[in-house]
Amino acid sequence: MPYSPSDYWEQLHRRDDLSAVGQSALPAGINGWLYRTLARNHARFLRRHRLDRPLPGRVFDVGAGTGFWVAWWRERGVARVDGCDLVAEAVDRLNARLGTERGRVRVADITDPAGLGPEAYDLVSCHNVLLHVTDDVLFGRALANVAALVAPGGSLVLTEPILIHPEYERPYDPDRHSRARALAAYREPLEAAGLRLDALEAATVLGNNPIEAGSPAALARFNRWWRFVARRSKEDPRSAAWLGRLIYHLDPLALRTGAAPSSKFAAFRRPAGAQPGA
């Protein structure tokens, strides 16, 4: 069946756990560890590039999902964290669970120019959302709309399967719910929207399915590892207790090798004094 974003996400959000927004084919337990690993790596990325110093006063989380990143930013002391999601049920649940005193999540389609509103933020976070906008025209609209949220001097931080090696990019398939794209597919529209690329780094080596590597042999090794993670966690969900810890503790060592087989962190800035849309 052709991919329908609203139907796809409404069905997944009935789970109300991290498997709804992470690795949907894997149990919630291992997804919890994958998110914990990514959050640790994300915090270190922000520190290295001084994206959390000073702490942004206003953050917007695109595709808030189960609220993992909204809660993460609020726990770090951000005064206001707003967000959006495509699924009304998920939005209602988040606002009820997290409260609205320090921000509100609203229903929005990021491909709709009127969906995100006119406000601008010090930092906009978008974690594994844009890959699910598989149509190229809608993807361009989504990038422009997300970029418009970034205030002068502010930043957009992405976690996406951005391909360093464009030869691994696959053509559009209407049946697929995700799509890895080359860096230029992100960079060129965002630069046209007034943002500049400041940093691009691996987000994880061991904590996501591989999409590229420097050689076929390296990609085969990463694929064997990920098949082991997927098979073991599905056969015995209790294995998350040790397998998740293994990923959490080994991933920083793997990152030091410079390998970047899956997700990337990308930080884009809007120069101070520049206006959104300029």
Image: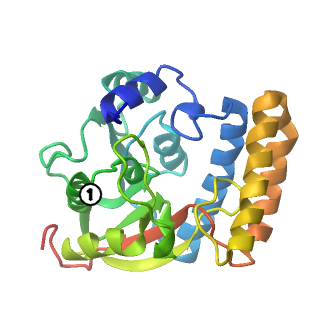
Is 229 placed above or below 212 here? above
Whether residue 193 is visible, yes or no, is yes
Of residues 179 and 157, the one nearer the viewer is 179
Quadrant of res 206 = bottom right
Residue 106 location, x and y as percent? Answer: 28, 34
Of residues 70 and 258, the one nearer the viewer is 258
Residue 257 location, x and y as percent? Answer: 75, 78
Quadrant of res 215 = bottom right
Helix, strand or loop at disc 1? helix
Is 130 placed above or below 174 here? below
Q: Residue at point 56% right, 61% down?
A: 263
**Three-letter amino acid code of the residue under disc 1:** Asp
Whether residue 97 is visible, yes or no, is no
**Left or right, 66 with reference to 215:** left
**Dot 1 crowding, Cα within 10 Å, few <14, some 14–19, many 20+:** few
Q: Residue at point 12% right, 45% down?
A: 114
Residue 125 location, x and y as percent? Answer: 41, 55
Of residues 153 and 117, the one nearer the viewer is 117
Q: Residue at point 51% right, 68% down?
A: 168
Quadrant of res 182 = bottom left
Q: Which residue is mark 1?
A: 136
Residue 181 location, x and y as percent? Answer: 41, 64
Q: Quadrant of the N terminus?
A: top left
Of residues 277 and 105, the one nearer the viewer is 277
